[in-house]
Image (cartoon, grey):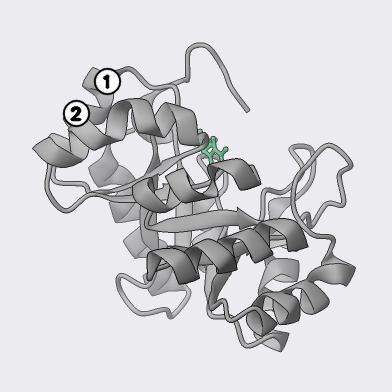
Amino acid sequence: MSLQEITTRIRAEEKRAGRAEGATRLIAVSKVQPLERIEAVLEQGHRLFGENRVQEAAGKWPDLKARFPGVELHLLGPLQTNKVRQAFGLFDAIHSVDRPKLAATIARIAQEEGHCPALFVQVNTGEEPQKAGVLPAEADAFIAECRALGLTIEGLMCIPPEEEEPSLHFMLLRKIAERNGVTGLSMGMSGDYERAVALGATHVRVGSAIFGARVPPQG
Ligand SMILES: *Cc1c(COP(=O)(O)O)cnc(C)c1O
């Protein structure tokens, strides 16, 4: 599907749901994609991209950013504390804030660097043991802890379990956001972004629907 088609579907879903036009931002998830596919999307004028790994992003984005001014890059995958400073240099947003040690490191480095990417707290809405994110029952306390460290929480992020109806997870994420006064909702991927838009997503993260299947596949 083309970027244009996906954007059209997002706008249609916003309208159906009674949301403002443009209320949802489309993050093109470019992890493991061949460079020429990423360049093609940049050449169409798209500037908001997502990557899963700091190292992989460091290998391709400095050059792409120099060639295509105005790129905004979001980190979607897990972040190790020893990569936080490098992440600050590469990313405009981090969607995977999920533990006290990481929050504390981000707060310290934000102070040292004098700036901070936009921060999203990842919530493990499906309570899957292998998945990152704070548990729903721990989310309120963790958001409060981040705020006590001086961090601004821009939004919440979730990746629903593959076998489950994503809408339930999107609704849970939204409920947690609302009761904590958090406005951003990073939810919805290639298979379910329209439902996420209907349920209030401010950021959808779409990879394979834009770029084609990832080869080799990566989580
Ligand atoms: C890979 C990935 C996506 C995009 O997945 P698609 O199904 O290809 O759209 C979105 N969010 C995260 C966190 C990812 O790792």
Query: Taking 61 as reference, is 185 left or right?
Result: right
Vertical side of 65 occupied by 119: above or below:
below
Give the crowd class for mark 1: few <14, some 14-19, many >=20 residues within 10 Å: few
Residue 196: percent from the left, percent from the top? 56, 60
Question: In which quadrant is the N terminus drawn?
Answer: top left
Residue 66 showing in the rendered view? yes
Amino acid on which the number 2 mark rests in the picture? Glu
Disc 2 secondary structure class = helix
What amino acid does circle 1 point to? Leu
Q: Are the residues flagged by discs 1 and 2 in contact, CB closer than 8 Å? A: yes
Left or right side of 195 for 204: left
Q: Tell me the quarter of the picture where residue 2 sits.
A: top left
> 165 left or right of 107?
right
Q: Which residue is mark 1?
A: 35
> Is the CB–ligand 1 distance for label 1 below 8 Å?
no
Q: Is residue 200 visible?
A: no
Picture quadrant of ligand 1:
top right
Alpha-carbon distance for marks 1 and 2? 6 Å
Q: Where is residue 48 drawn, in percent x and y?
A: 30, 50
What residue sits 72% from the left and 48% below the top? 160
Residue 178: x %, y % from top left: 66, 84
Per the image, label 1 sits on a secondary structure element best described as helix
Q: Position of residue 162 (x, y in %)?
A: 74, 38
Residue pictured at 75% horizontal, 53% vertical: 133
- The mark total stands at 2
Which residue corresponds to the image point at 38% horizontal and 70% vertical from the top-left? 114
- Residue 98 in the figure: left or right of residue 9: right
Q: Nearer the viewer, residue 201 or 65?
A: 65
- Identify the mark at residue 39; answer none if there is no mark: 2
Against 44, residue 140 (above or below) is below
